[in-house]
């Protein structure tokens, strides 16, 4: 006999890599069963607008609006605002498409009017008829700052403006002492869950801000659902983004073993890439092995299903 | 012998009608000789952005960027932001084009950073290589409010959202007690001038906000240059916009006589439309008569030239 099952799943996620797993999960779970808890440490104010890159990537990806060529922003995008801003001598290192702008302007105004980021994000997801609940990890300001050989930088300045070129020495989360877990996140994590997944996002810059929130690790452990990490490392390299460079600059091994060690005391299972299957015996948690490179929708569904099956196996 | 001549001209202006005269003036005076003092009573904050309709109409018209079909906004405009805002359930009664948005976002940010509206507007005009100086009448908040049979309204809500449909009962300028004339406007009006023109804008809603600024009438009179009004009324009707409806609702005669009476103690001459030439003898100031309907660029140049010639005649 298995325990009474819940079909509800919570997934902690950063940006692009995380959103791929979220899309797979959205396809394999019952509509309404998935809640994404999204990093807001990358959020910043730019041109007077509040930009939330990871939340927007989740919204656009799960609603089928994501730009498949760029890997960020919206599909069918135009750039007339940006061209004109260039003509006016404005700051153009962070590219905002004409359609994308509407979300930032709406959000900035609603936050100014006193709405929480959580309420605003839920409202947008409802208008887009999303079957998934997308939640910011917090309604408060927690901002990732990086210390580099080019000085201390806001995350987006490091990540987008300087394309991660400065050598990373350290990182910290401004506001972490006072930022509170968003109420809907607490509520989601107090439900009976089938699984809590950690998406294959950057463990240091995308997942750690979530885990750093006061009370988050306790909420995750006390839920009792198995916590499964999906590997962001495939055969000694990160799939996308600066994870490998960052690990190397921080003196970490670029290996699933280092990621699992980073998540120790938290995870109950690890989805390992088939290229790293030789490491299975060295992992200190149960593993599932699959091709974790999520290029197609069916890849995403498969990885999502493998992660959930691992959770069910661990839970037996 | 004429007095020592200046070639400098100041023109007080509202939106679309005023900008037509400004364009004509820009073509007939020496580059650099024209200063436009523009109404900012219509300015408002919308979607978190500072919108300055009359300043923008002047900037776009004088730089050749104005939208010839719409009569407002920019040419070659696209509306993807607005379409997306509609999808998100945002406020869409005030239409902002993708290119137009860049100016509002830049301005909002610069004002928030402490730049004056005057400095920002001059900066934009410089980037557009305009031969004309465009100045807001004030850097402070002076906001036109209208009392109507549908209640008291912000100007743009009356003018754009409700398309001037409510019956106008009264109007007032919030902040007029504290708003100061922009320093560059004071400086422009303390120079020796060839003429001060009053554009064919709505005398009540576009020109009166300028004249209502503390010290403005004194500055205009003390300059000593002839003050010439170009008629906004042609044969018993306003060329464009709600001027005729407003005059009628305010119980005023729709006639150049009523306009000249409104500007009494201020103007030294009046450019009358040829359709109203029978009223010339009833005007209490010298008149010049021409076709004042400004459909083509050469119409605009002609009306500008006639107004300046009247100024020169009055000044002899």
Image: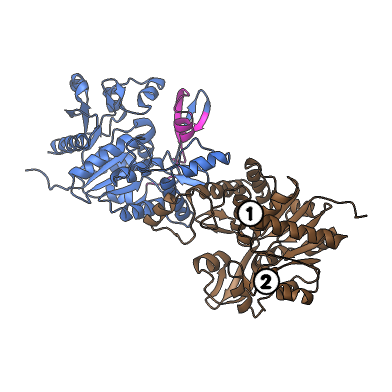
Chain colours: A brown, B blue
The C terminus of chain B lies in quadrant: top left
* Separation of marks 1 and 2 at Cα, in angstroms: 20 Å
The reply, left or right, for residue A192 in relation to residue B232 is right
Q: Position of residue B10 (x, y in %)?
A: 26, 44
Residue A275: numbered disc: 2
Q: Residue at x 49, y 54 (%)?
A: A96
Magenta part of the chain: B152-181
Magenta span includes B166: yes
Decide which of tag 1 and tag 2 comes sooner along the chain: 2
Question: What residue do we see at 44% from left, 46% from top?
Answer: B98
Q: Which residue is mark 1?
A: A297
Q: Pick whichever, B282 or B57, lies toward us.
A: B57
Q: Quadrant of residue A313?
A: bottom right
**Same chain assignment for discs 1 and 2:** yes
In the displayed image of the protein, which residue is found farthest to the right? A1
How dense is the environment of label 2, judged by Cα within 10 Å: few (below 14), some, or many (20 and up)? Answer: some
- Image quarter where the N terminus of chain B lies is top left
Q: Is residue A137 visible?
A: no
Q: Is residue B307 shown to the viewer in this render?
A: yes
Q: Nearer the viewer, residue B5 or B98?
A: B98
Tell me where residue B50 appears, x and y as whole percent.
47, 46
Image disc number at residue A286 = none
Q: Position of residue A157 (x, y in %)?
A: 53, 66
Q: Secondary structure at mark 2?
A: helix
């Amino acid at each position: 006999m298995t325990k009474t099952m819940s079909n509800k799943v919570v997934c902690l996620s950063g940006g692009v890599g995380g959103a791929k797993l979220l899309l797979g999960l959205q396809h394999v779970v019952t509509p309404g069963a998935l809640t994404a808890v999204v990093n807001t440490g990358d959020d910043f104010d730019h041109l007077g607008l509040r930009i939330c890159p990871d939340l927007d990537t989740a919204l656009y990806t799960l609603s089928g609006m994501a730009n498949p060529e760029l890997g960020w922003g919206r599909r069918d995008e135009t750039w007339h605002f940006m061209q004109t801003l260039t003509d006016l001598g404005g700051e153009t290192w962070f590219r905002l498409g004409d359609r994308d702008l509407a979300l930032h302007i709406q959000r900035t105004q609603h936050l100014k009017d006193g709405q929480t980021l959580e309420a605003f994000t839920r409202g947008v997801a409802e208008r887009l008829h999303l079957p998934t609940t997308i939640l910011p990890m917090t309604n408060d300001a927690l901002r990732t700052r990086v210390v580099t050989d080019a000085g201390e930088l806001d995350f987006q300045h490091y990540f987008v403006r300087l394309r991660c070129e400065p050598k990373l020495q350290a990182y910290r989360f401004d506001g972490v002492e006072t930022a509170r877990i968003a109420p809907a996140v607490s509520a989601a994590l107090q439900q009976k869950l089938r699984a809590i997944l950690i998406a294959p996002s950057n463990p240091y810059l995308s997942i750690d801000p979530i885990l750093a929130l006061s009370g988050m690790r306790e909420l995750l452990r006390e839920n009792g659902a198995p916590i499964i990490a999906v590997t962001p490392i495939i055969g000694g390299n990160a799939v996308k983004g600066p994870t490998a460079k960052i690990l190397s600059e921080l003196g970490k091994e670029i290996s699933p073993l280092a990621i699992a060690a980073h998540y120790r005391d938290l995870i109950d299972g690890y989805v390992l890439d088939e290229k790293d299957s030789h490491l299975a015996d060295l992992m200190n948690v149960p593993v599932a092995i699959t091709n974790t490179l999520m290029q197609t929708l069916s890849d995403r569904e498969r990885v999502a299903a493998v992660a959930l099956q691992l959770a069910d196996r661990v839970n037996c």
